[in-house]
Structures are given as C-alpha cells and as structure tokens.
Amino acid sequence: MTAGPRALRAVSLVVVKGHDAGVTARVGAGHCVMLGRSPLHGEQAGRRTGMLPAQSQQRLHIEDITAVERHLQTRNGGHTHATDASATFERDVDLVLADEAVSACHAMVCVDHAGASLHDLGSTNGSFVNGAAARSADLADGDLVRLGETRVSVRFGGTP
C-alpha cells in the first residue's frame, strides 16, 4: 500500500503521570519502541530496560518479531505481508519507566503506514487504552495509555 499525503510519520509517547512525568519517546514510521521497567535500581538503571541499552537501535528479536507479526495481521484483518513488514521494523530506544507495577518488557508501540498500535507483551498487570484493557489496540492522537501507575499520552506528528 502506498502511503498517502496524510500518512503517519511519527508518534510521541509523553509520560503525563508517574515518576517519569515529562519523559518523551519518539517513534517514527517503520519503527517500534519497547515500554518497560528496568530491573536495575538507582544510578545503574540509567536509561535501559532488561533488553537493550538506551542508545541501541537494532532489529527485533525473534520472539518480538513473532508478536509483531501476529499483531499486524490482526489489526490489518489478515490482509498484510506481516512477515516482510515486521522484519523491516527497527527498534527505537526503549521507554524506561520507574514504576514497580510495570513489567520489564511490558508493551510495544509500533508505527507503520496503517497508523500506531500498542501490543501488550504478556505483562503482569496489563495495558489499558483510555481505561479499557488492551492486549492489542490501534492508537489515536490523544489516547491515554496506562501501564501500572504510569500514564502515557499518544501524540501524532512526533512533537510533544
């Protein structure tokens, strides 16, 4: 599918409530970002989850690729070449949350030609979009995502 003039280019995830209020992660088209809690504490935590250091950018691990494939197939009604699509997704810098109720690998947000979407990665406490429990969900501009006690605002256009 060819991206039209209104194709989504980027999404900003802005922490609006929680210990990390004000922190922003930008997710460009063709990219995804992991949202999770660092298993490290204090100074060691820095900006990392248990998966990648803060400045890393690499292809998804096979488990994540499988999850993204299923998610993309579901959200596109099974009418996608998800294997090709997910294999080309790049992983942006993780959004690390200092919230004990957030799993280390809690959820993933992906942005592609179809828009932005959230996929819960089997977190302990679940993910919620605008108050509704969500295993997988399309995201719209202004949506409020709850992970643990943290609230993240979704803003299209990639600017806070």
Image: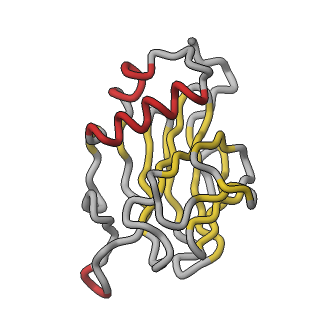
Quarter placement of the N terminus? top right
Q: Is residue 126 left or right of residue 83?
A: right
Residue 124 in percent (x, y) is at 48, 65
Residue 47, how many percent across, how many down? Answer: 34, 69
In the displayed structure image, the side of residue 92 where residue 13 appears, left or right:
right
In screen coordinates, is 159 left or right of 43? Answer: right
Kindly indicate the quadrant of the structure image that contains residue 156: top right
Query: Which colour style is shown?
Result: secondary structure
* Residue visible at 38% across and 33% down in the picture: 89
Residue ID at (31%, 41%)? 63
Q: Residue 153 at x, y = what percent?
A: 66, 60
Horizontal and vertical percent position of residue 123: 47, 60
Q: Residue at x 56, y 72 (%)?
A: 148
Nearest to the observer: residue 13 or residue 134: 134
How many marks can you see?
0
Q: Residue extending furthest bottom?
A: 42
User: Which quarter of the picture shows residue 103?
Assistant: bottom left
18 over 63 or under it: above or below: below
Asked if 70 appears above or below 18 in the picture, the reply is: above
Give the quadrant of the C terminus: bottom right
Q: Residue at x 59, y 72 (%)?
A: 150
